[in-house]
Image (cartoon, helix red, strand yellow):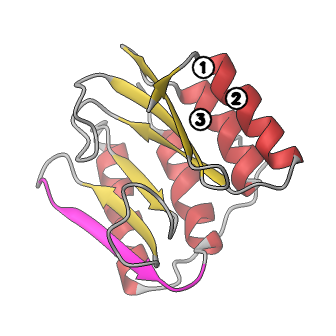
Amino acid sequence: MKIVSIAEIVKLAEKLKKDGKKWHFHLLTPDCVFNKEGSYALVLENSSDRQTLVNYSEAKQEEAGKILLELLHGIKTDESYKKTESATSLEISNMAKRAGELTERGIPWHHHALFPDCIFNKSGGYWVLMLEDPETKEVLESVTDYKPDADLQLIEPLFYKQKE
């Protein structure tokens, strides 16, 4: 992984989208199962060119995450965005319920959308949506053979609704 600035990550994401290339990103917390550095990390994977960029910081890069989320999935996190109201599976329903409980109690949580070609995805080509529960240390997962757009529209706004 090449270490770069937040601005470089956002600029590359905009270019990749414009060029129609495959890419996605991750916001990793210090205690994330995928994070070995112990600080916050913003990771951009350019799957088309097999390039991975990262920025490490002492704070969650929430604003950059919102920009990248809208670029990648078209999901806005403000109140004007009409999100999906119901889960598509029991796994997603449980994930959304747990995220809501943690948010209500002010306990920070995070999740991942692992694309089939993601460097963190060990599912053998499936889409994986997962939530890391900070209390139980459990990982809730939904594995599908299709892009979970409706599930992301449910989970992403919950994530950005959390208070720091």
Residue at horizontal 52%, vertical 64%?
A: 115
Q: Which residues are magenta?
A: 137-146
Dot 1 crowding, Cα within 10 Å, few <14, some 14–19, many 20+: many
The residue closer to the viewer here, 142 or 50, is: 50
Name above or below for residue 10 compared with residue 146.
Answer: above
Q: Are marks 2 and 1 in contact (CB under 8 Å)?
A: yes
The residue closer to the viewer here, 59 or 126, is: 126
The residue closer to the viewer here, 35 or 83, is: 35
Label 3 sits on a secondary structure element that is helix
For marks 2 and 1, give the CA distance.
6 Å
Tell me which label, 2 or 3, sits earlier in the chain.
2
Find disc 3 in the rendering and name its residue.
65
Which quarter of the image is occupied by the C terminus? top left
Dot 3 crowding, Cα within 10 Å, few <14, some 14–19, many 20+: some
Q: Position of residue 25 (x, y in %)?
A: 55, 45
The numbered disc on residue 10 is 2
Is 145 inside the magenta-drawn segment? yes
Name above or below for residue 7 compared with residue 67.
Answer: above
Name the residue type under label 2.
Answer: Val
Name the residue type under label 1.
Answer: Ile
For marks 2 and 3, give the CA distance.
9 Å
Name above or below for residue 32 compared with residue 156.
Answer: above
Label 2 sits on a secondary structure element that is helix
Residue at horizontal 29%, vertical 22%?
A: 39
